[in-house]
Amino acid sequence: DSGVTQTPKHLITATGQRVTLRCSPRSGDLSVYWYQQSLDQGLQFLIQYYNGEERAKGNILERFSAQQFPDLHSELNLSSLELGDSALYFCASSVRDYSYEQYFGPGTRLTVT
Amino acid sequence: ELKVEQNPLFLSMQEGKNYTIYCNYSTTSDRLYWYRQDPGKSLESLFVLLSNGAVKQEGRLMASLDTKARLSTLHITAAVHDLSATYFCAVDNRTQGGSEKLVFGKGMKLTVNP
C-alpha cells in the first residue's frame, strides 16, 4: 500500500458524459501527478500539480482538466467522453515538486460504453 | 522528444535462470526509475537510479545506469515465479528544461515458468 488513495476504483459511463476521478496523496506529499494507462498508448503522463498549482502538462486532452485543492487532494475531470478514453487512470504523489520517487495509487478503471 | 525503449517486450524464462533486460532512452537524463506492475494492479517502485554508474540491488534484481550510453539494465538472477510481472522503466524529462514528467517505456512482460 503506497498511501495514495483513489476513488472510485471502477467507473462505467456512456460516451458524451463527464466524470470526476479523485486522488488523495500520501500524507506530507505536496505533488500530485496523473497518468493514463491504455493498451494503445501505454503509460502517459497527463498533468502535475504542486501545492495547488499546475506544474507540468503532458499529453492531456483539452476535454480533460484537473485541479489540486488546499487539502492537497486532486481531481481529474474528464468530459465529452469517447470510447478511446477507456483506460486505467493513476494518480501518483511525491514529496517535492520534483522528487526522486513517485508513489502510485491503485488506479481508477474507466470504461466508456 | 524523449523516447524510452525497452527490450525485450516479452520474456518467458525458466526458474533458476538469469537474464538481463534493457532500457534505452533518446536524450540526456540523469534520473531513471524501474517499476513493477502486477496484472490489474498499480505500479510499485523498484529502483531509483540517480547518477551515472549507479547500481542498486534488491533480492534477485539488480539495476544499473549508464547515462553516457543512455542505457539502464535490469538483471534478473535465479528467477522465481514470483518475479512474473510487467517491468517498466521511466526516465525523468526534467533535465531537458521541459516539464517535470516521467516518460515510460512500453513495459516488459516477464513470465517465469517452473
Image (cartoon, coloured by chain):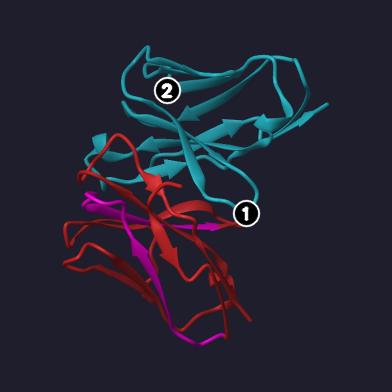
Residue B48 is left or right of residue B58, and the answer is: left
From the viewer's perspective, is residue A60 above or below residue B81? below
Image position, residue A15 (x, y; %): 56, 85
Q: Where does the magenta region start and end? A: A15-37
Residue B23 is left or right of residue B86, and the answer is: left
Q: Residue at x 42, y 32 (%)?
A: B33
Chain under callout 2:
B
Specify the chain shown as red. Answer: A
The front one of B69 and A11 is A11
Marks 1 and 2, the one that precedes in the sequence: 1
Image position, residue B38 (x, y; %): 62, 44
Quarter of the image where the C terminus of chain A is located: bottom right
Residue B85 is left or right of residue A13, and the answer is: right
Task: Indicate which label's residue lies in the foreground, 1 or 2.
Answer: 1
Looking at the rendered structure, the kind of residue marked 1 is: Gly
- Specify the label residue B70 is tagged with: 2
Snapshot quadrant of residue A91: bottom left
Specify the chain shown as cyan. Answer: B
Determine the secondary structure under disc 1. Answer: loop
Residue at label 1? Answer: B40
